[in-house]
Amino acid sequence: MKDILIMGIESSCDETSVAIVKNGREVLSNVINSQIKIHEEYGGVVPEIASRCHVEVINMIMKQAIKKANVKLEDIDAIAVTQGPGLVGALLVGVSYAKGLSYVTKKPLIAVNHIEGHIAGNYLTHKDLKPPFLCLIISGGHTHLVNVKSYNEFEILGKTRDDAVGEAFDKVARVIGLRLSRRTKS
């Protein structure tokens, strides 16, 4: 049976990332360009700056991911990209790049929901994991408790209505003078 290689492109906030994954469970490469240093002076992510930074590095990050995975672009079977939720401008950079790459290479394009991507990340860490299971997603922008019924069927049992846990940590850190992480400025 032929191995399936998926290129994943992520640009929903302040990191540009391209990964090559084999058969849905093995990460061959994961190249990340962080913008933390750029946004630190503003006390959080500035969406317009984040978008410009994605534009500047996305092609280089893709090439590095291909090289690190020791594959060729022709070997890739499909291109997956975060389509939301996230910062609109940042998402547009990743989606536009993925669409162009998909068109030029004639590879299928897979739109990925950011929250579902967090859930799917568990399959990379826990190779034997299979639904059903409960998943608690705690990130800078999202806090959800999800009943994962199958690989593509989810029931949100609860979620925050305002700030996510990560955003709350950033706000507390700002008030007490601790170094901020990389979340959106509030």
Image (cartoon, rainbow, N blue to C red):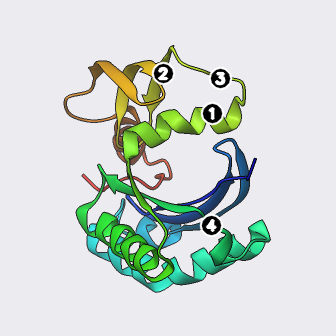
Q: What distance separates the C-alpha of mark 4 from that of mark 3? A: 25 Å
Name which of mark 3 and mark 1 comes first in the sequence.
Answer: 1
The answer to which image quadrant residue 44 occupies is bottom left
Marks 4 & 3, CB-CB < 8 Å contact = no
Mark number, residue 129: 3
For this rendering, which residue is in front, 152 or 83?
152
The answer to which image quadrant residue 184 occupies is bottom left
Q: Residue furthest right?
A: 70
Q: What distance separates the C-alpha of mark 3 from that of mark 1? A: 6 Å
**Residue 91, how many percent across, how many down?**
32, 64
Left or right, residue 114 beside residue 128: left
The answer to which image quadrant residue 140 occupies is top left
**Residue 15, how many percent across, how many down?**
49, 63
Number of other residues with Cα within 10 Å of mark 4, as a class: few under 14, some 14 to 19, many 20 or more:
many
- Classify mark 4: helix, strand or loop: loop
Residue at (36% x, 81% y) in the render: 52
For badge 4, the amino acid type reads: Ile
For badge 3, the amino acid type reads: Leu
Answer above or below: position of 175 versus 56: above
Q: What distance separates the C-alpha of mark 3 from that of mark 2? A: 12 Å
Q: Give the label, 2 or 4, closer to the camera.
A: 4
Marks 3 & 1, CB-CB < 8 Å contact = yes
Q: What distance separates the C-alpha of mark 1 from that of mark 2? A: 12 Å
Number of other residues with Cα within 10 Å of mark 3, as a class: few under 14, some 14 to 19, many 20 or more:
few
**Residue 171, how many percent across, how many down?**
34, 42
Mark number, residue 123: 1
Q: Give the label, 3 or 2, closer to the camera.
A: 3
User: Which residue in the structure is indicated by mark 4?
Assistant: 76
